Image (spheres, rainbow, N blue to C red):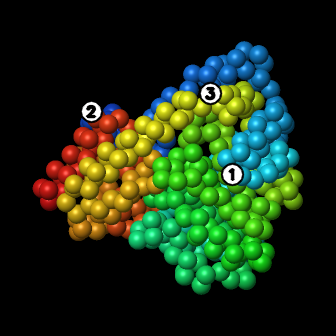
Amino acid sequence: MKLATSMTRLGTETAFEVLARARALEAQGRDIIHLEIGEPDFDTPRHIVEAGQAALGSGWTHYGPTQGQPELREAIASYLSRTRGIQADPARVCVVPGGKPVIFYTLLALIEPGDEVLYPNPSFPIYESMINFCGARAVPIPLLEKRGFSFDLDVFRAKLSEKTRLVILNSPANPTGGVMPAEDIAEIARLLADRDVIVLSDEIYSRMSYAHEPVSIATMPGMFDKTVILDGFSKTYAMTGWRIGYGHFPAWMVDPVNKLMVNSNSCTASFTQRAGLAAITGDQGPAEAMIAEFRRRRDFFVEKLNNIPGFRCPMPEGAFYAFPNIEGTGWKSKPLADALLAETGVACLSGTAFGSFGEGYLRLSYANSMDNLEQAAERVRTFIGNK
């Protein structure tokens, strides 16, 4: 027996591979500082946990609607309308177990073999993995450090073709922390306005923007009905393990997405949705405090990284990742990331884990304590200084 050929096109998420290696070193007694995994180091706020516990005790343990509980979809639509400046519709909200299903379902619903999908590079590796799995052609658009890790718009224009079916945007971005300027979003919208192209706008880090409010392409003329908005609870509310996300889809995509959902997951866990309802409608203080702490850590950690010989770290405008340029060290990205883990106990990711244009960079999550961030920077500085 052999696997389907499509499985050879399926990639992975390197963060979990590095985490496993780091855990194995810890089991051997090594002291590891974890800057590799992309999740908040905060606990889920107490009122959200209590809502989930109450839901379990009240019998929210059965199947629910495939599209999501109506009260939660209404709350999500209200939240999107308020934060994006759009008229979001509960009937167009689909609640799914995490953000990744929105990526997968969008591609499965839209993409035929031979279609082209434009996506940022470096970026969340699941984009490219799912594009390839679906048999489409992945067309990378480089993110440029000199443009604050926004698109090279000249390349974007050149790569648009009659075969382009989907464009993926991510702002604030993983791994760069970049936030696309409003004028870049407007230009992309102008270029797509008259094309038969859908945009998947990954806005999972929308609340984690430190310079200015990120702009959703759904607000641009003619783009509301051509945009899938991906968002969720994992990052803003420290709910990565709860597995709950959502998409706001063009109306004609809702039924196909529901079919994919019912064929794969049936529904998102009912008690998790009750916790999500408490998150999005309840006290926002814990989320705001966490984001403020991330800003403080960002400012501290970036300064420390810029004191390492050969490092040049732009100030990230969003998310909770630093993406330093390490070309001045003479190292390639993956060998340096591997060496830092093996020799210093600092677990981080190579820029190439996010695509070929990530060469020359590392991704380090600053979702860790100030003490650990300071110690990690000192370990890296000592390592580089001794090589």
Sequence-first tag of 2 and 3: 2
Total tally of numbered discs in the picture: 3
- Which tag is nearer the camera, tag 2 or tag 1? 1
Which quarter of the rendered picture does the N terminus lie within? bottom right
Sequence-first tag of 1 and 3: 1
- Near-viewer residue (202 or 362): 202
Residue type, numbered disc 1 = Arg
Q: Residue at x 32, y 56 (%)?
A: 337
Residue underneath mark 1: 84
Q: Residue at x 12, y 56 (%)?
A: 386
Percent coordinates x, y for residue 85 in the rendering = 71, 52
Residue type, numbered disc 3 = Asp
Mark 2 to mark 1 CA distance (whole Å):
47 Å
**Mark 2 surroundings: few (<14), some (14-19) or many (≥20) residues within 10 A:** few
- Which tag is nearer the camera, tag 2 or tag 3? 3
Residue underneath mark 3: 283
Q: Which mark is residue 29?
A: 2
Residue type, numbered disc 2 = Gly
Q: Is residue 19 visible in this depiction of the protein?
A: no
Q: Residue at x 54, y 80 (%)?
A: 155
**Mark 1 surroundings: few (<14), some (14-19) or many (≥20) residues within 10 A:** some
Q: Is residue 62 left or right of residue 352?
A: right
Sequence-first tag of 2 and 1: 2
**Mark 3 surroundings: few (<14), some (14-19) or many (≥20) residues within 10 A:** few
